[in-house]
Image (spheres, helix red, strand yellow):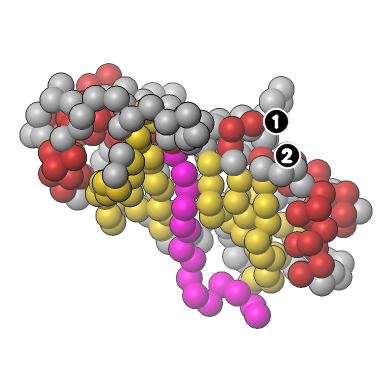
Amino acid sequence: MRYFFELSYNGKAYHGWQNQPNAISVQEVLEQALSTILKTNIFIVGAGRTDAGVHASQMFAHFDFDGEFVTKDLVYKLNSFLPKDVAVKEIFEVKPEAHARFDAKSRTYHYKVTTSKNVFDYDFAYQVQIPLDVEAMNEACKILFEYRDFQCFSKSKTDVKTYNCDIKEAYWIREGEQLTFVITADRFLRNMVRAIVGTMVNIGLGKLEVEDLHTIIKSKNRGEAGFSVPAHGLYLVNIVYPEDIRLN
């Protein structure tokens, strides 16, 4: 039988989601915990591959297991076994063909920027102590909806077959001294959100004009876009699946 589980994690201590040969990953600690508790080797598939240092307030993954367990009991045991920076919220049975990665209809990321020095959130937000033109940054967001090919925001060495993404929403929110960039799409390229935010910050600083974003996207050249902001300000916050994916 196939099971989905919902989890969250603080990515500071991890070299991303996916297993790495010489570094600890979120996937590794989860597989170790599940394998120990269920007493068999468990392989899990995540909804995406967050980079080193990126956080997730909502992530999903799936695994197969033919034995029996009580889902609430397994959640409790996992949370007792897992380190303090990884938490499982729920486990539920899904259709046998359900896939945590390929069945996701959309994903939403937040990127947090603080405009003042804050000793409590320097690990969880990018600090920019220069005023940003948020209105211009939101005008630039509207341009993203005019395109589908975002190769200019992708890491150059990647094995994807297409650079097309359907961006469904993109905007900035200001709450006091904290800015949050919200972006939802059907899929994301490697480093895409961090590259978009870096480009937006350059627009907010006046280093780029809003209309320059058209030229950057059309160039399909990563070198034309802005810098990649640090990973610690990025959060995967929501993943949407078809409503009928659950079995109970």
Q: What percent of the width, then of the height, locates residue 142?
A: 16, 48
Within 10 Å of the Cα at label 1, are there few (<14), some (14-19), or many (20+) other Cα atoms? some
Q: Is residue 221 above or below residue 174?
A: above
The circle drawn on residue 60 is none
Q: What percent of the width, then of the height, locates residue 11?
A: 58, 37
The quadrant of the picture occupied by the C terminus is: bottom right
Q: On the image, numbered disc 1 is attached to which residue?
A: 24
Residue 92: say if magenta.
no
Q: How many marks?
A: 2
Q: Which residues are magenta?
A: 234-248
* Residue 41 seen in this snapshot: yes
Element at label 2: helix
Image-based side of 176 in relation to 73, left or right: left
Q: Please report the residue visible at 33 percent of the width from the left and 41 percent of the height from the top.
A: 178
Locate residue 29: give its quadrant.
top right
Q: On the image, numbered disc 2 is attached to which residue?
A: 28
Q: Is residue 55 above or below residue 80?
A: above
Q: Are marks 1 and 2 in contact (CB under 8 Å)?
A: yes
* Residue 159 seen in this snapshot: no
